[in-house]
Image (tube, rainbow, N blue to C red):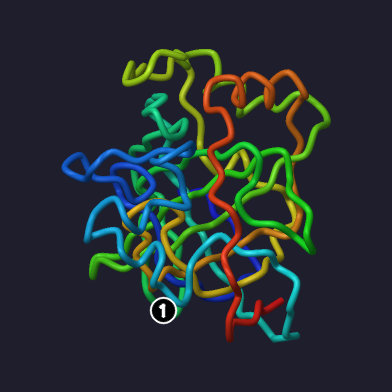
Amino acid sequence: MRNIVTIMAAAVLSFAGVTGEGHHADHPHWGYKGKEGPAHWGDIAPEFRLCKEGVNQSPIDMNRFIEAELPKLKVYYAGNARSVVNNGHTIKVETMGKDEVVVDGIPFNLKQFHFHTPSENKLKGEHFPMEAHFVHQSDGGDYLVIALMFVEGKHNKALQKMLNDLSPKVGEKHQLKEMFNPGELFPKKLDYYRFAGSFTTPPCTEGVRWIVIKQPVEASKEQIGLMHEIMGDNNRPVQPLKARCILK
C-alpha cells in the first residue's frame, strides 16, 4: 500500500535537473568560489546566460507574502532512497519506485533529492543551517521542487541511514544498505510557502514550481557538520524578488 503524505500546499514551478541540481555532464565547469562562482555563472557559457539575465531566479529571501487559500497537495511516496553520492556540487540521493506529487492537477515524479549548507532560501533575512531539495519532474518535462529546512537539534534517524553509506570522495556512489522512504525526512505538519523560481545552479532555467515547507526538521550538530565538511558552502546567494510575492 502506498504511503500517503498530505501536504497543505500550493502549486510551484519547475526546478533542477534530473541528474543533479540542473547540472548536465556536457556543461562547462562551474563552482561556488572564485571565477567559477555564482557571480560569474552567467559569463561562463552562453547556455548559462539566465544566471545573470533571468527575472525569476532562485533562491530568494522569503520576506514578502500574500495570504492565500492554498489547495491541499497530495504526495504519494511509495519508493525508497537507493544510493548516495557526493557529486562535487552537492550530496545527492537517488530514488527508486513510484514517488509522486500532484500539483495543479499534474503528477510529478520524484527523481532525486540533495542538500545545501547553509540553506539557499532565506526566511525574513535568515539562513537555516541546511536545506534539502526534493526534485520532481512531470511526464511533460516540467519541474517541481519541495524544499525542506533543517535546524540543529536531535539526531535524525532517516538522515543517518544516508550518512552511513556516504563517501566524501567525489563521484563515489554507494548503494544504501538500509533504504528508506524519502517521506521519513518530512515533518508531521506540512504547511508551506509557494513561489515561482528557477534552478539554483547553472543553467539557472526558469519556470520552476517551488514549495518550501514551513516547519523545519531537526538534525544533530554532528550530522549537519559532517555534511558541511563534505559539501562546503554550496548555496547560491539570494536573487532579487522583482515582481514576485510568496504565497502562504
207 to the left or right of 212:
left
98 to the left or right of 63:
left
Vertical side of 169 occupied by 204: above or below: below
Residue 162 horizontal/vertical position (percent): 52, 23
State the residue at coordinates (48%, 59%).
145
83 to the left or right of 133:
left
| Residue found farthest to the front | 35
Quarter residue 222 falls in = top right
- SS class, disc 1: loop
State the residue at coordinates (48%, 55%).
76
Residue 221 horizontal/vertical position (percent): 77, 24
Mark 1 residue type: Gly
Residue 82 horizontal/vertical position (percent): 38, 28
State the residue at coordinates (40%, 13%).
169
What crowding class fits label 1: few (fewer than 14 Cα within 10 Å), some (14-19), or many (20 or more)? few
Quarter residue 52 falls in = bottom left
Vertical side of 186 occupied by 123: above or below: below
State the residue at coordinates (77%, 39%).
151
Residue 21 horizontal/vertical position (percent): 39, 47
The residue that disc 1 covers is 105
Question: Between 7 and 58, which is closer to the camera in this rendering?
Answer: 58
The quadrant of the picture occupied by the C terminus is bottom right
| Residue found farthest to the left | 26
How many marks the image carries: the answer is: 1
Question: Between 120 and 29, which is closer to the camera in this rendering?
Answer: 29
Quarter residue 97 falls in = top left
